[in-house]
Image (cartoon, rainbow, N blue to C red):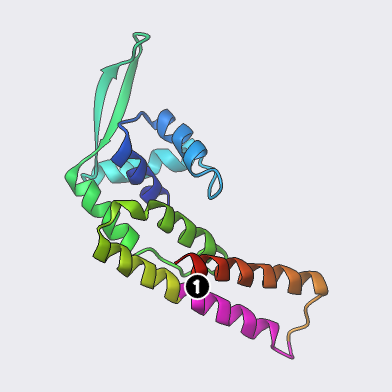
Amino acid sequence: MSEIVILYILCRYDATIYKISKIMEEMFFAFLKPSLGTINPAVKRLVNLGCIDIEDKMSQGGMASKVCSITPVGRKHLKNLLLSVEFTHPAHVLNNARIALFCSDILDKIEREELLKNIQNHLILFKGRTQEALNNPYLTLSDEQKKISLSKVDEAQKILEML
């Protein structure tokens, strides 16, 4: 998801890696807490894929800095990443859905509908599997565990209602 977020930010702003980190904190505060240890390797991968250009510039304070900008390949790659967002890990389903929805404004109408359908399908599966586990007579859960699981079902339902 970090590559999606980085490319999404670069669709809006040219930025240094530090600025990307700060924008991630401000724009995506509810979904993720980035670290430079995550951002740097992701930026390097995206540069190697031709998705990002890096240009040496002088800052207003006279310091040399490297400014990242998205390329046309990067815009296409971002759309492909959004349309193929993965929901393989149950612990990440809700967060991945939120991030993908948050970034979906860069998609055209047909692409956005495809993304929404994909998210909808995965949220329905997530809800079903969670409810199935809650109804499993062989799975002994405490009241707190049941409440936590039910709260995740409620979160998924709220996102579905938004769609």
Residue at the limit of the structure toward the top, as seen here: 62
Whether residue 35 is in magenta: the answer is no
Which secondary structure class fits the magenta region best?
Answer: helix
Within 10 Å of the Cα at label 1, are there few (<14), some (14-19), or many (20+) other Cα atoms?
A: many
Q: Is residue 94 left or right of residue 8?
A: right
Please report the bounds of the magenta region as a residue range: 122-138
Residue at the limit of the structure toward the bottom, as seen here: 137
Name the quadrant containing residue 101: bottom left
Question: Which residue is located at x 48 percent, y 64 percent?
Answer: 162
Q: Amino acid at mark 1?
A: Leu
**Front-lying residue, 111 or 163:** 163
Number of callouts: 1
Residue at the limit of the structure toward the left, as seen here: 72
Residue 125, given in percent of the width and then of the height, sits at 50, 79
Whether residue 130 is in magenta: the answer is yes
Residue 40, given in percent of the width and then of the height, sits at 40, 38
Question: Which residue is located at x 26 percent, y 41 percent?
Answer: 47
**Front-lying residue, 154 or 134:** 154
Residue 16, given in percent of the width and then of the height, sits at 36, 28
Q: Is residue 139 above or below residue 121?
A: below
Question: Which residue is located at x 75 percent, y 74 percent?
Answer: 146
- Dot 1 falls on a residue whose secondary structure is helix
Q: Is residue 143 left or right of residue 111?
A: right
Which residue position holds label 1?
123
Q: Is residue 37 above or below residue 59?
A: below
Question: Which residue is located at x 34 percent, y 30 percent?
Answer: 15
Residue 100, given in percent of the width and then of the height, sits at 41, 57
The C terminus lies in quadrant: bottom left
